[in-house]
């Protein structure tokens, strides 16, 4: 509460010594022209501190959200790598099954073609992929 006449506030406090404490206990600060500027400066600093704390809280929440998203992406990417590794293994196992040796499906198909005098359509020859596919880790690339 601003009292524009400092002498009036001093007279009131002289008459009632506990006036300031009683007002303060009810959330009221008594001020005069001599103390208004320091009170206003304290209020300004308190408001800035409140805004700063609020901003820090928002930054903290945004950082936590970002960390959670990065972790989720990392987990998904790790799972993708695991699946790609499995696909490469299956692909490479398939190449082994197609190679020209005594137990491959390609050898069996060629034997059926020879024995049964069966021909494939022109340009549709069997061709086994030459090279297996390997995933390399980031350290190897």
Image: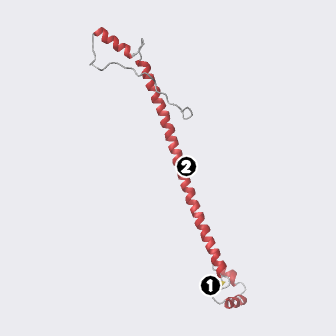
Q: Which mark is residue 134?
A: none
> In the rendered view, would you say 89 is above or below 8?
above
Residue located at (73% from left, 89% from top): 14
Q: Quadrant of residue 33?
A: bottom right
Q: Which mark is residue 67?
A: 2
Q: Quadrant of residue 18?
A: bottom right
Label 2: few (<14), some or many (≥20) within 10 Å? few
Secondary structure at badge 2 equals helix
**Drawn side of residue 133 relative to residue 121, left or right:** right
Q: Which is more toward the observer, 122 or 30?
A: 122
| Marked residue nearer the N-terminal end (2 or 1) | 1
Q: CA distance from mark 2 to mark 1?
A: 49 Å
Count of marks, rendered view? 2
**Drawn side of residue 12 relative to residue 88, left or right:** right
> In the rendered view, would you say 22 is above or below 81?
below
Residue located at (47% from left, 33% from top): 83
Secondary structure at badge 1 equals strand
Residue 20: x %, y % from top left: 69, 82
Q: Quadrant of residue 10?
A: bottom right
Residue 27: x %, y % from top left: 63, 77
Q: Which mark is residue 2?
A: 1
> In the rendered view, would you say 22 is above or below 5?
above
**Drawn side of residue 106 relative to residue 9, left or right:** left
Q: Which is more toward the observer, 26 or 116?
A: 116
> In the rendered view, would you say 37 is above or below 69?
below
Q: Please identify the quadrant where the N terminus is shown.
A: bottom right
Q: Which residue appears farthest toward the top when viewing the image?
A: 115
Residue 28: x %, y % from top left: 63, 80
Label 1: few (<14), some or many (≥20) within 10 Å? some
């Amino acid at each position: 509460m601003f009292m524009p006449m400092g002498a009036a506030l001093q007279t009131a406090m002289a008459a009632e010594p506990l006036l300031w404490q009683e007002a303060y206990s009810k959330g009221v600060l008594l001020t005069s022209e001599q103390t208004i500027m320091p009170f206003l400066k304290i209020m300004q600093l308190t408001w800035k501190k409140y805004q700063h704390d609020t901003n820090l809280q928002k930054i903290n929440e945004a950082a936590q959200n970002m960390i959670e998203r990065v972790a989720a992406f990392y987990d998904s990417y790790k799972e993708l790598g695991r699946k790609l590794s499995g696909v490469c293994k299956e692909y490479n196992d398939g190449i082994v099954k197609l190679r020209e040796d005594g137990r491959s499906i390609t050898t069996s198909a060629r034997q059926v073609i020879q024995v049964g005098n069966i021909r494939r359509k022109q340009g549709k020859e069997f061709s086994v992929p030459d090279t297996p596919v390997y995933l390399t880790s980031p350290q190897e690339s």
